Amino acid sequence: MTMPRPTMLVAATAAAFLSLGTLVVPSLAQAQRVMIGGPGGGGGFDPGVDSRQLDRYSAFLDLSADQKDAAKALLEAYQIEFDQAASEARKVLETTRQEFQETRDPSVFEEIGPKMEAFGKRRRELDRNFMSNLHDLLSEEQQQKWPALERLRRRDTSMRAGFLSGEGVDIVRLVDDLKFEPDVKAQVAPILEQYEMDVDRALQDRNALLEQQNFMRNFNFRQGITDEMRERFEKIREQSIRVQEANRRAARQIESVLPDGDRARFQSEFKERSFPRVYRSPYTMRAIESAARFDDLSSDQKKQIEELRANYSRDAAPLNERWASALEQQEKAADPVDAVFGPGPGGGGNSEVRQARDARRALDNKSLDSLKSILSTEQVERLPDRREEAEAAGDQVFIQRGR
């Protein structure tokens, strides 16, 4: 028997609380990240600032050696306080998880919302204090860069709180990662300057709403999704669209000034970051590429593998476009809850999404079987381990301390 929609969402939301370290659907992972960490910090039980981020901020601000040492000392003190707060919050979740396993009564979760909200406030307080202390280390000249650093930090820490395709793509970082030639960077620079301001305004508005409209606040696990919660989701979706549009507008403007080769790379990367489940390299392609590097292939095997790679790329392209389009249409669903969780049991998406996804998976399986038929038994055994490759590539969404 199909589980009623409200009951299903109650069960799914309860599962999100219990899933630290287990598999959950992406939208629930995002929801939990917003609920616990808030949109302005790290996710779940991760600190809002880590050593890698501090290194990036230090380079951006051009800190001296003494300033870097002082900043590292601030980070160590911050992390001690954060770990203490996170440990207490984990105990609350673990106690509730055990109680639910014993009673199977979802009402045990009703007290979690306020407690996790309190943890979220504490973590944001710690984040603000750290950043304030870091600011105090700066010279007057370095302080001139602080507003730009705050914008960078908001993109770093809060873009991933989004629910819509492309909403979490930082165009500045995308351009940096592609490492364009200096003359191309000069063409793109004015667009990025305007984008920084546009997306920052949209992020601040969305983040304020996420904190104000915390979807888990006063959530009744017996009642499930209410009309009031649907209104909250709709408001959040409206603000998320502003962030999404800022990203897409900047992407179109950048594409218009790039030379052909760079434009193709930019378009491909933007697609992959907008729809990572669709466009990232699947296991089948990684297996084909791995096999192509075997040093014991016959000339005939090499030829067949190259043909398989070309055929797979050709056939996957329209299937990927169909899948991405279906996901985008789902986001525009009239029901704002469906737009975030995905309609149907488990939030797995509507029929168009499932059909498009299954069509791509069918091609993946068929092509993988073809690859194995080309290789010898010993060569097949040397293909990448599917589970390890899947986890390394992010084919499964895990919440492990909020990641």
Image (tube, helix red, strand yellow):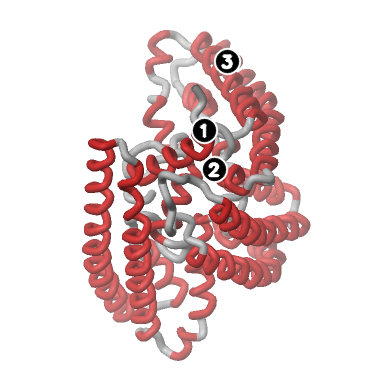
Query: Which residue does the image show at 40% across and 72% down from the upper left?
Result: 58
Q: Is residue 279 above or below residue 289?
A: below
Query: Which residue does the image show at 49% across and 74% down from the upper left?
Result: 149
**Residue picked out by circle 2:** 341
Residue 50 visible in this rendered orientation of the protein: no
**Residue picked out by circle 1:** 4
Which class describes the residues within 10 Å of circle 1: few (<14), some (14-19), or many (20+)? few
Q: Position of residue 159 (x, y in %)?
A: 53, 59
Which quadrant of the view contains residue 353? top right
Query: Which residue does the image show at 32% across and 60% down from the upper left?
Result: 115
Q: Position of residue 216 (x, y in %)?
A: 44, 55
Lower sequence index among marks 2 and 1: 1
Spatial distance from mark 2 to mark 1, Cα to Cα?
A: 15 Å
Judged left or right of residue 307, residue 222 is left
**Amino acid type indicated by mark 2:** Phe
Judged left or right of residue 2, residue 103 is left
Q: Of the residues tagged 1 and 3, which is closer to the observer?
A: 1
**Residue picked out by circle 3:** 366
Query: Which residue does the image show at 40% across and 82% down from the upper left?
Result: 135
